[in-house]
Amino acid sequence: MQTMAKLPYHYGTKFRIFPSRQQKELIKLNSDISRTIYNKLIAIDKEIFQLSKVKIPIIQVKQRIDDLNSRKNMKNLANHYIYMNNKNIDSLAKANASQNYKKAWKMYRKVHSAGTPNFHKKGYSESYQTNCQYSKNSEMNIFSGTIKFLDRKHIVLPKIGKIRVKVSNPIIFDKSNIRIGTVTVKKDSYNKYTISLQLASDTPFVEKLAKTDSQVGIDLNTDNFLTVSDKAHTVIDNPRYYRTIKTKLAKAQRKLSRKQRRAIKEHRNLKLSKNYQKQRLLIARLHEKIRHQRNNFLNIISTRLINNHDLIVAENLKSSNMLKNHALAMSIADVGWRTFLEKMTYKAKLYGRKFILVNPRNTTQQCADCGFVMGKEGTNKLSLKDREWICPKCHTHHVRDYNSSRNILAKGLSTLEK
């Protein structure tokens, strides 16, 4: 049987699960151990770093460093902390915690856009990762591994056992040759349990879409969500989900703050304070509503674009830089540009379309007809309030966002020609 890396087609899916009270305790145990191992590895590396600064070579220091390095091995770490040998702990959850720590360092060294790995705080959400393993003679399907479906309503997880699942995407039952890879079990802050499956196969999960002979550029902006460079001048409005519920959310958070202060004043544990927990769940539900609304909107728009066009070109916007502008930070965070671009990237690959990201430089300031760039030859640059303008060179009237989408498409096409 081929490994996950060697299989050419990959797919990810997420389902809701409904564990029993005992299964919830086992999920919490594995989540706590996963977080503990990650934090122990951080603590070990921090201590090694401090000890390495000692200028005078001392035998005890060298012995301590050697001891700490040996603990990075999961078997040695579990022998040092006896509670990690609990029979209800999934051994692959421990291995994945160590692997995730190494990946965090690898990403830091590769990207350098974030800090070094930090300690994971204990919160209301829980999660851990495990893997599906197959025996040498077993078939590659979703019914024969250590993590397997018994039917459309039940799945078996290591140490957790049989658990009820709500399958929202039946694609996994329509194909026979599917291998299950990494599995993430998660409980969110609203106490909802989900399971995410990484799947792989030697045949496509979906059929390639028929060609439409359509190529478009899309301009993402805060005034509206996006503008398409088609003949219809398609404009999709920005739903602003967070802004519509912001007042209600702020009122609920003030109530939560008052209940927190009262509980602390009366020396009550917040986790045992029923009124506090009831209000916390209400706020978590509001945040979940915003997240689901935005995610559903982005899925609909991205799928529509992928279905209707062979080539889609967009700006490679860096939201992290744009969020530094306090006047636009809320609008940028609410619109979900980065999530949208990620959805477009994986859906284009999945359905056999082309999606290109281009440098956004001068896409707004340049005339799509004659190429004149505003800000040159004594002209002023366009500001955010300038929604329409006339090119001082060819005198063409432009709608700012539509002109920008045409420039973006032109950049994408020039990239393909090189």
Image (tube, rainbow, N blue to C red):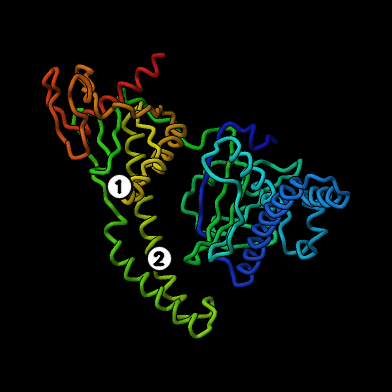
The percent coordinates of residue 331 (x first, y second) are 30, 49
The percent coordinates of residue 137 (x first, y second) are 75, 41
Element under disc 2? helix
Crowding at mark 2 (Cα within 10 Å: few <14, some 14-19, many 20+): some
**Residue 317 image-quadrant placement:** top left
How much space separates mark 2 and mark 1, taking CA atoms?
A: 26 Å
Say whether residue 310 is left or right of residue 378: right
Please tell me which residue lies in front, 162 or 125. 125
Residue 68, relative to residue 398: is it above or below? below
**Residue 360 image-quadrant placement:** top left
Residue projecting furthest to the top: 418
Please tell me which residue lies in front, 230 or 332. 332
Q: Earlier in the sequence, mark 2 or mark 1?
A: 2
Element under disc 1? loop
The percent coordinates of residue 199 (x first, y second) are 58, 42
Quarter of the image for the N terminus: give it.
top right
